[in-house]
Amino acid sequence: MATIVGKVVAFHDCFVQDTPFNIAQPIYILGPKTGISVTLPADSELIIEWCACYPRTVVIVTVDGIFHTSNGFLNIVELKFPPSLIPSTMIHKVKNVGIVFPNVYILIENSLYLASIGQVINIGELYFPHVDFIGIEAATWCSEAYPYFTVTFYHERDYSELPDYRTQVALSQG
């Protein structure tokens, strides 16, 4: 456990003051141990997503696969997908990722997946059928007073009955 004290500073996109951060984390293996690799399209720049409250947790997406560490790169594990979960035409179309510790949201083409300990599911198909997602954004507030995560999913369709054009899922840390 480390605490940043004194002057307010920006740390992993959070303004912090006297905030404890858990530096040491156990190793988490997301998704199944075997399966297929999903990647960025060829010639894409890699994506690096840090977990704001757990700074040793990182997801890196490359043209070779999605890689995850929860201990500051001492161990790196490739996140695999069950072959039956994703069509072969989409395995090289990762667009973005977002971390909501310890889970990872993955946007592939227009579908949204959730990788958690031991499994990967298509949450778009499960919870938002017939929705084409065009973006994902994860925001985290790390303070013990406000343990709150927000993941915002953007979609193309006109859902005029919604108060806005974003569907938000708020998850409490705990």
Image: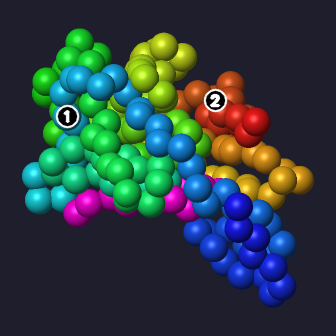
Where 162 sits versus 16, above or below?
above
Residue 132 x %, y %:
40, 29
- Residue at left 56%, top 61%? 55
- Residue at left 68%, top 25%? 161
Magenta part of the chain = 45-56
Q: Secondary structure at mark 1?
A: strand
Q: Where, by quadrant of the figure, is residue 79 drawn?
A: top left
Q: Badge 2 is on which residue?
A: 160
Residue 166 x %, y %:
61, 39
Earlier along the polypeptide chain: callout 2 or callout 1?
A: 1
- Residue at left 41%, top 34%? 29
- Residue at left 17%, top 39%? 92
Q: Where, by quadrant of the figure, is residue 115 drawn?
A: top left
Q: Where, by quadrant of the figure, is residue 120 drawn?
A: top left
Q: Residues within 10 Å of mark 2 (few under 14, many from 20)?
A: few
Q: Residue furthest right?
A: 145
> Along the line of sight, which residue is nearer the eye, 46 or 118?
118
One can see residue 9 in this view: yes
